Structures are given as C-alpha cells and as structure tokens.
Image: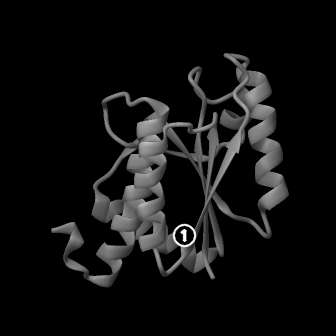
Amino acid sequence: MKEVHLIVVGKLKEKNILELENDYLKRVKNFSVYIHEVKSGNDDVNQEGLLVEKKIYSLKKSDPKVYLLSEWGEIQTSQEFSNRLYLCFENSDQVFFLIGGAAGHAQNILSLNHEKISMGKMTYPHKLARLLFVEQLYRAETIRLGHPYHK
C-alpha cells in the first residue's frame, strides 16, 4: 500500500483537534497516512532539523518524494494537490511531507532541495496547519475517486 508520512515538529496535545484529525485519517482508504512527531527544540531549529532528517532516513524504503510545507512554497488548488500526490504514487510507494517548528525548517532540511508547497498566503498555528493538511489528504483521495465531498 502507498504511504504518506507527515513529519511534524512538536506534539499535538489538544484533544479536540486530535479527534478531528483522527476522523479524517479513518476516512482515508486508498493509502496509509502516518504522522510522526519529533521533539520541538524550543527554537533550536538545528536540533529539530537533525531529528527530522533522522526520522526521514529511519522510515524511507526507497527514494521517496519529500515536500516541505512552507510559506514560500508553491500555492496550489486542492485538485492540483490531488494530482501531484497521485503522480508521486506512480513513482514511489512513499511520500513525505514536513511541517517545521515555530522557527521554520532547519538549514539541513532546506539544503536537501526538497520541493516546497504552501497551504496559502496566511500563516496558521502548527496544530491547525497539521489538521488542515490531513483534511487535504482525505480531500485528495475523494477528488481522485470522484466522490462528492470536494464539491
């Protein structure tokens, strides 16, 4: 089965947001979604970067596509995101998405030359960005299947 790995800096503690996130995760049927939390470095972005890089290398099976969620990334519609995700699945069994900490992505992560995508021009708290992204994964699947959820 195809895998999406969302690696996030920091732990999500809000019970209500976790419940919403889990609801979307249960709805996704055509690929597996794994969320990996790495410890926040309390603004030590370099420490966070090392933990994120270590997590990627511990999980990767082949040559997965890696995307940074970044305010400087490419803005796309949900349809474009769905197309991109499924195109990645044609070339790899794994796709990684990274959400950095409050200070952003570390230089070691930025220097790996991963593609950047943006969830829009607004800035969101990390816990909400994570929830919105998980919802977009479910939406991407419904778009692909022609399900009416996206309308």
Judge by depth and name the residue closer to the eye, 118 or 126.
Answer: 126
Indicate the quadrant where residue 104 lies.
Answer: top right
The x, y position of residue 125, in whole percent, is: 43, 29
Q: Residue at x 30, y 74 (%)?
A: 143
Q: Residue at x 63, y 82 (%)?
A: 1
Q: Looking at the image, which residue sits at the far left?
A: 151
Categorize mark 1 by other alpha carbons within 10 Å: few (<14), some (14-19), many (20+). Answer: some
Note whether 46 is above or below 128 in the view shown. above
Q: Circle 1 is placed at which residue position?
A: 88
Indicate the quadrant where residue 4 lies.
Answer: bottom right
Residue 73 in view in this figure: no
Residue 140 in view in this figure: yes
Judge by depth and name the residue closer to the eye, 15 or 60.
Answer: 15
Query: Label 1 amino acid?
Result: Cys
Q: Residue at x 54, y 76 (%)?
A: 31
Q: Please identify the quadrant where the C terminus is shown.
A: bottom left
The x, y position of residue 19, in whole percent, is: 45, 53
Q: Residue at x 59, y 20 (%)?
A: 103
Note whether 3 is above or below 14 in the view shown. below
Q: Secondary structure at mark 1?
A: helix
Q: Please give the count of numbered marks on the rendered protein.
A: 1
The x, y position of residue 126, in whole percent, is: 49, 33
Q: Looking at the image, which residue sits at the far top?
A: 43
The x, y position of residue 84, in whole percent, is: 44, 65
